[in-house]
Amino acid sequence: MQNNIFSGLFVGQNLVTIKQIDSTNTFLKNLLSNSKPVPEGTVIMAEEQYAGRGQQQNGWHAEPGKNLTFSLLLNPSFLPVNQQFDLVRVVSLGVHNALKQHLGSLLKIKWPNDVYYADKKLGGILIENIVQGSTIKHAVVGIGINVNQDVFPAHVPNPASVKQILQRDYDLRLLLSEICSHIEAAYLRLKAGNVTEIREEYLAALYWLNEEREYKSNNSVFTGNITGVKENGLLVVNSDNRELMFDLKQIEFLNKTI
Ligand code: BTN
């Protein structure tokens, strides 16, 4: 299906909209294993996901018809598996740059790939890589953005929507096309070898970068400053003049406002 509001070269040029599905990531992964070749940049967008999946085995809640829930296919075979975090950077930056045009400088990327506005979560990203040998054959990039939802169930931690911030509805397809073109632009820069630039921009967009904040790890609370992210994606926090490194499951950001 062609859609001319998509201005990029390939991301979103093949857009499939589905009324109801368990998870767009699962759907796209099944498509890759079951059918004829799927063009790179294909976007599967669902009006409703009844079993949306999030990071760390969590679910993903989104009120039907009001939010963006979609998955897009990238084939980053140029990227060695040990550099897969660069894809996390590219996708996070793409989403961040698209939304920042509307929401301004309070928009941040919460490491590793949550989209935050002030201290609230506006969206999340779930990338599932299909690896062949030492390269990534396919990346199924799942993105959920809270767009026009007014009220969230109590079990959703710390949510915000674009509508709650801007006080008006936003056109879902238009926002989808903007996100797709920003992801494509960042992806093509990575593919062209501008990895240093991508890493610097990702770091500059990080929530709590260089701020003295509280974290929890191994059941102990400590104060530290995020100073960097390693090539492989580990978060670097400086605490008491020591450089500590964390994987996703090893550190919790302690927001006093929650
Ligand atoms: C997170 O936990 O922050 C990641 C959320 C990712 C949700 C999106 S919605 C579209 C795609 N399909 C899924 O099942 N999950 C991702």
Image (spheres, rainbow, N blue to C red):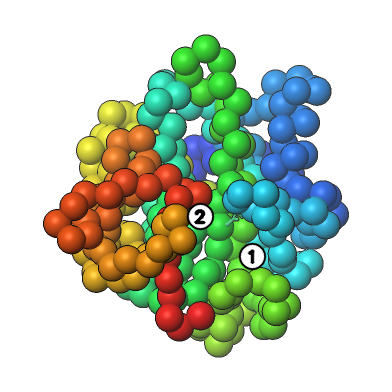
Question: Residue at 76% across / 48% down in the picture?
Answer: 23
Which x, y percent locates residue 121? 52, 69
Instruction: Count every numbered label the image shows and give the total.
Output: 2
Q: Circle 1 — which element?
A: helix
Residue 211 versus residue 127: which sits nearer the camera? Answer: 211
Question: Residue at 31% across / 46% down in the picture?
Answer: 245
Which x, y percent locates residue 153? 73, 77
Find out if the beta carbon at label 1 lies less than 8 Å from the nearest ligand 1 atom.
no
Q: Circle 2 — which element?
A: helix
Which x, y percent locates residue 1? 72, 41
Alpha carbon of mark 2 to alpha carbon of mark 1: how far?
11 Å
Task: Report the side of 25 relative to 180 (left or right).
Answer: right
At label 1, counting other C-alpha atoms closer than 10 Å, the crowd grade (few under 14, some 14-19, many 20 or more) is: some
The residue carrying mark 2 is 179
Residue 254 versus residue 71: which sits nearer the camera? Answer: 254
Q: What kind of residue is marked 1?
A: Leu
Task: Report the side of 216 relative to 240 (left or right).
Answer: right
Q: Is residue 89 above or below residue 99?
A: above
Question: Residue at 49% across / 74% down in the picture?
Answer: 120
The residue carrying mark 1 is 172
Q: What kind of residue is marked 2?
A: Ile
Give whichever of discs 2 and 1 has the lower sequence position: 1
Task: Report the side of 133 relative to 62 (left or right).
Answer: left
